[in-house]
Amino acid sequence: MKTRFRFATFVFTLLMLGFFSVVPWIGLVEMGMKRQGHQSSVTIGLSVVFLVILVAALVAIVWLTLRITIDPDRKTITFIYPFRHQSFTYDFNELIGFRYKYLNGKVNYKSLKFRTRSDLRTFSVSDFETVNLRALETFALQHFELRGGKEFRQLTAQEKKDQLRESQYFDQEQAKEIRFYLIVYLVLLALILVEVIRKLLVAEGTKVYVLCLSGFVIIITAYLTANRLAKLRKVIQSNKKENNTR
């Protein structure tokens, strides 16, 4: 199996950071032309801050982006840093195990950390950038030992049950969070579509084609969002059934 990137997440993140970096620079140029001292200083500060954030994000993507390839037949696992052109391959028995880590943000994310025996390297991958992290998690639970803490200590049977229960609870709560934001997004798309239709009724010439294209893009986006919502609904219901059977 192979982990897959969330390219849309990378692109969206960079576009948003790029936007907030460029706007202050535009303001800086305008202020520089007008030679307004105090306002220009504030703009310089904003520009530097957002530029640093953008550069830090790019460095993080290049340095931390990880892809994992697993060969069950040969019992090997390969950790690949594609942007660094580095890869590390280990036999299954060369891994101490893996542990969970949860990352806080606008939406919380789950991370899996793997530790090796020989060189004590730690490899981390999360569902922020990885589409099929749950499939990797299932495979890891079947073939590697679940550990705990930064030192990857051995867990008792009860501690493992608690870790798994926490992971399942996290999955359900994360799905609810994402569902909420997607519903808000759908409402915004609906409002924008209403406005596009309203303008379309009085538009003339080339504006008609532009508005039609905009409406089409909004409808496709809304369809994909609704499809994602339907999948999340199934995940939430599935998790509820699993919790009820315990």
Image (spheres, grey):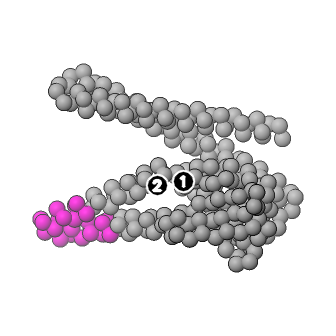
Secondary structure of the residue carrying numbered label 1: loop
**Amino acid type of the residue tagged 1 in the rendering:** Phe
Mark 1 nearby-residue class (10 Å; few <14, some 14–19, many ≥20): some
Q: Nearer the viewer, residue 80 or 42?
A: 80
What is the spatial separation of the Cα atoms under label 2 and label 1, in whole angstroms? Answer: 9 Å
Residue 163 in view in this figure: no
Give percent across and percent down for residue 198. 28, 24
Q: What residue did someone put label 1 on? A: 5
Q: Earlier in the sequence, mark 2 or mark 1?
A: 1
Determine contact: label 2, label 1, CB under 8 Å: yes
Residue 178 in view in this figure: yes
Q: What residue did someone put label 2 on? A: 10
**Amino acid type of the residue tagged 2 in the rendering:** Phe
Give percent across and percent down for residue 32. 16, 68
What segment carries the magenta color? 25-48
Give percent across and percent down for residue 137. 71, 53
Secondary structure that dominates the magenta span = helix
Left or right: 235, with 162 as reference point: left
Q: Quadrant of the C terminus?
A: top right
- Residue 60 is covered by the magenta coloring: no
Q: Quadrant of residue 31?
A: bottom left
* Residue 114 higher or lower than 181, as above or below: below
Give percent across and percent down for residue 189. 40, 34
Q: Residue at x 82, y 67 (%)?
A: 154
Q: Quadrant of residue 176?
A: top right
Residue closest to the far left: 34
Secondary structure of the residue carrying numbered label 2: helix
Q: Nearer the viewer, residue 76 or 68?
A: 76
- Residue 28 is covered by the magenta coloring: yes
* Residue 164 higher or lower than 234, as above or below: below
Q: Residue at x 51, y 32 (%)?
A: 226
